[in-house]
Image: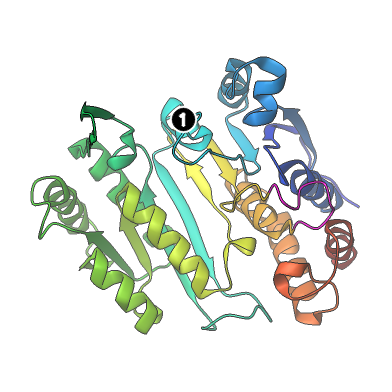
């Protein structure tokens, strides 16, 4: 099998729970597709804390800075206590301001809709996810929502440029400016200014609660959606539900210098180590990564291999309605390559 002409080094953050299992599966599939990658394995999360005394070692951040690109498995985040999100920390440290979440139907996946094909572009560095919160007095906590012209403008630019480069026809800005007139109002002002520079792309706006309803009633009316951080987090998971759930949903975090590609599902500690995890979400994230580094032919072949396995329906993991193990579905995808 022909391999890539030049060997690339990419940071691999395997993560927690099922992360190492699905990461290893994806590494095998990429190798089978003939892409020559040297993996710089770097720790993060609970596993990193056990070994390094910190959930995000500087080595990991430095590795991504050096290699420019990383593939990241799921990392657990404690709810209401414990350490802060590793994913959020990496996005801030590396200025990965654009979260890209393609939402596309796959063959034979049980879902409410078929032939869904839309793109979520989420601002990744500010909003309520700035993490600036404090206790005012006992029993009263204040969280600050930070919206800037700089971040709002560049995420709108990213969305419109993505639309133009990928033959998309419309960009919808999602907001709550009817209530948060200054913060979401600024986000909308920036989106409108950017829209004026792209007369070939249709532009419209939706209040976030209405956008959620419209996605359930008729998701086909949307093409590219651009949202601030919290709305993007919520709506991207809602959209994953339109096409069967998070088990197959890819994600990318992209900045001007660096990019991290990651599955958006959790670390599923209840099935960790049992050879039951579905690697398709991380694999589809790796497809985005391969496209990003110029390995389009391999990306296309892997996507087709996934679709063939799903169409046949004989080797499916439990979340897809089958009984296959991680090893078995990995082998099936490699066989289709």
Residue at screen point 58% across, 56% down: 250
Count the marks: how many? Answer: 1
Q: Is residue 258 magenta?
A: no
Scheme of image coloration: rainbow
Q: Examine the residues drawn in magenta and state their main secondary structure.
A: loop
What x and y, as percent, mark residue 81? Answer: 46, 33
- Specify whether 124 is left or right of 4: left
What x and y, as percent, mark residue 31? Answer: 84, 46
Q: Quadrant for residue 200, please give it.
A: bottom left
**Mark 1 falls on what kind of element?**
helix
Which range is magenta? 269-277
Mark 1, residue position: 89
Is the residue 324 above or below the residue 27 in the image? below
**Does the image show residue 137?**
yes
Residue at screen point 73% across, 47% down: 18
Residue at screen point 20% across, 37% down: 148
**Does the image show residue 161?**
no
Front residue of 154 and 81: 81
Front residue of 106 and 195: 106
Residue at screen point 80% across, 79% down: 313
What x and y, as percent, mark residue 177? Answer: 13, 57
Residue count near mark 1 (Cα–Cα under 10 Å), binned few <14, some 14–19, many ≥20:
some
Is the residue 16 above or below the residue 328 in the image? above
Is the residue 141 above or below the residue 67 in the image? below
What x and y, as percent, mark residue 41? Answer: 74, 28
Front residue of 3 and 282: 282
- Specify whether 186 is left or right of 258: left
Front residue of 233 and 332: 233
- Quarter the C terminus occupies: bottom right
């Amino acid at each position: 099998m022909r391999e890539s002409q030049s060997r690339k080094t990419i940071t691999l953050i395997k993560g927690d729970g099922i992360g190492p299992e699905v990461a290893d599966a994806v590494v095998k599939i990429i190798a089978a597709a003939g892409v020559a990658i040297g993996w710089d394995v770097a720790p993060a999360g609970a596993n990193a804390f056990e070994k390094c005394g910190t959930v995000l070692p500087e080595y990991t951040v430095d590795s991504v800075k050096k290699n420019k690109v990383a593939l990241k498995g799921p990392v657990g985040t404690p709810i209401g206590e414990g350490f802060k999100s590793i994913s959020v920390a990496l996005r801030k440290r590396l200025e990965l301001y654009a979260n890209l979440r393609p939402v596309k139907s796959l063959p034979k996946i049980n879902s409410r809709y078929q032939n869904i094909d839309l793109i979520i572009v989420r601002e990744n560095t500010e909003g309520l996810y700035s993490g600036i919160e404090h206790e005012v007095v006992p029993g009263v906590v204040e969280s600050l929502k930070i919206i800037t012209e700089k971040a709002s403008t560049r995420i709108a630019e990213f969305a419109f440029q993505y639309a133009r480069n990928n033959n998309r026809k419309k960009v919808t800005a999602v907001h709550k400016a009817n209530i948060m007139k200054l913060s979401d109002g600024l986000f909308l002002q920036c989106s409108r200014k950017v829209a004026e520079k792209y007369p070939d792309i249709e532009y419209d706006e939706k209040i976030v609660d209405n956008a959620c309803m419209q996605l359930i009633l008729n998701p086909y009316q949307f093409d590219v959606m651009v949202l601030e951080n919290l709305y993007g987090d919520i709506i991207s998971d809602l959209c994953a539900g339109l096409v069967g759930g998070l088990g197959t949903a890819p994600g990318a975090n992209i900045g001007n210098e660096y990019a991290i590609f990651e599955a958006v599902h959790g670390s599923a500690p209840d099935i960790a180590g049992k050879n039951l995890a579905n690697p398709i979400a991380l694999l589809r994230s790796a497809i985005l990564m391969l496209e990003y580094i110029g390995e389009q032919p391999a990306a296309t072949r892997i996507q087709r291999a996934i679709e063939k396995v799903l169409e046949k329906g004989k080797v499916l993991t439990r979340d897809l309605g089958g009984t296959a193990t991680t090893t078995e579905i990995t082998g099936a995808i490699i066989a289709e390559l």
